Image: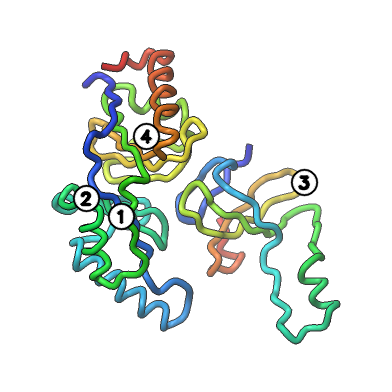
Amino acid sequence: MLQIRCPWCGPRDEPEFRYGGEAHLRFPGNEADPAAWARFLYYRDNPAGAYRERWVHTAGCRQWFHVIRDTTSHRILGSYRLDEPPERAR
Amino acid sequence: MARLRFEPVRDLGALTAVRPAGRGQGPEASGARARALGGLVAALGALPGENRVASVSGREVLWLGPDEFLIASSLENGSDLEQVLRATGAGAVIDLSSNWVGFDLAGDGARAVLASGCSIDFHPRSFGVGSIAQTSMARVPITIWQRSPEPSYRILVRPSLASYLAAWVADAAGSLEAGSLE
């Protein structure tokens, strides 16, 4: 089981959270062409290593936040609030 | 040390949730938020910090998240408390008095019982009087806060899960020999 540090509540077990997919996707804008929309909606990065993703603390404070997880080892490298840059992850 | 006690709270009082106005970012939102929090402080006397409970004369203000508080009051009934909070213009206010069943868990072995069903650290160095957490215990969502150094904890649980949780705690207390329940 993963232990994830909620930026508000502290370290908690994985079942308290829900996963929200890749973080930092950019809304393409209403006027973007279909290819840009397809990229935004369906294309996801799949790195072997550090991956920035969204999680929500459903059993606790119900806040969304960001997690950096190593996809090869499942290690949680850090987490940070939505209004913080990835460099603030801890 | 007192023996382990686990009992339903007969009179839980009024429980009302508040989501202060001014969510989001920017000067407009932060101004609205400052006014909402100021109104709540004026009405309640204090607001808690993160993961804390503020107790002021018959009312407890529970921090549930950065944009949500739960106010537990023995001064008034739920609809009166809702009116008091609405009058501050603080944001979204709703009476949840019927939404929760309360238990008090206290005395010797209380931490051992909690540790067997709940993964957060209840050692005094990280969870003391006035600490609050929303977490799960025996797979049941709970809100728990410490009310005295004895230690004594109050646990809120959904009514439909209360009898399951009570049975689970009685079983855990027995198997841990943490002291039989009175």
Using a 10 Å C-alpha cutoff, classify the residue at mark 1 as few (fewer than 14 neighbours), some (14 to 19) or many (20 or more): many
* Residue A72: image tag: 3
* Badge nearest the viewer, 1 or 3: 1
SS at circle 3 = loop
Using a 10 Å C-alpha cutoff, classify the residue at mark 4 as few (fewer than 14 neighbours), some (14 to 19) or many (20 or more): few
Asked if the residue at tag 4 contacts the one at tag 1, i.e. Cβ–Cβ closer than 8 Å, the answer is no
Residue B58 vertical placement versus B107 (above, below): below
Mark 1 and mark 4 lie on one chain; the one further toward the N terminus is 1
Task: Give me the chain letter of mark 4.
Answer: B
Residue type at mark 4 is: His
Q: Nearer the viewer, residue B9 or B34?
A: B9
Residue A27 vertical placement versus A43 (above, below): below
Asked if the residue at tag 4 contacts the one at tag 2, i.e. Cβ–Cβ closer than 8 Å, the answer is no
Q: Residue at x 40, y 27 (%)?
A: B163
* Badge nearest the viewer, 1 or 4: 1
Report, in whole angstroms, how far the alpha carbon at label 2 lies from the one at label 4.
27 Å
What residue does disc 1 label? B16
Q: Nearer the viewer, residue B132 or B125?
A: B132
What residue does disc 4 label? B123
* Residue B73: image tag: 2
